[in-house]
Image: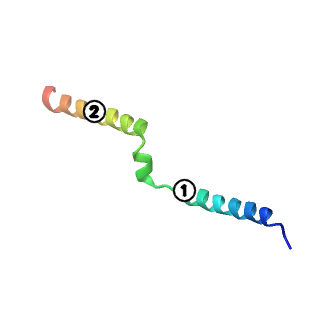
Amino acid sequence: MPDTTQLDTQLDTRQSETTRVQDEPRGCLFALSQPPLMIFLAVIGCLLLMASLHDLLLL
């Protein structure tokens, strides 16, 4: 008969592996919620907006 403490640690390891696997799949919304990406996209958007306004109003 196996030792119950060894069995408990094996079960705990399996449970932590399954929770780790469930936490890994993340989609696009997780990537968009990252502040550096949002700052980058905002800067690019502002540059495009300024360029389009410059073309429309000043040229």
* Residue 33 picture quarter: top left
Residue sitting at x 80%, y 62%: 6
Name the residue beneath numbered marker 1.
Answer: 23
Question: In what element is the residue under mark 2?
Answer: helix
| Residue at the farthest top position | 58
Q: Is residue 1 left or right of residue 13?
A: right
Q: In the image as oriented, which residue stretches furthest toward the bottom?
A: 1
Q: Is residue 17 above or below residue 47?
A: below
Q: Residue furthest front?
A: 4
Q: Position of residue 2 (x, y in %)?
A: 84, 70
Residue 41: x, y in percent?
Answer: 36, 38
**Amino acid marked by disc 2:** Cys
Farthest residue, direction left: 57
- The kind of secondary structure element at disc 1 is helix
> Which of the labelled discs sits on residue 46, or is there none?
2
Q: Quadrant of the C terminus?
A: top left
**Relative to 26, is 2 on the left or the right?**
right
Q: Please tell me which residue is depicted at 43% across the width and 53% down the height of the picture.
A: 28
Instruction: Pick the quarter of the image with the N terminus.
Output: bottom right
* Three-letter code, disc 1: Asp
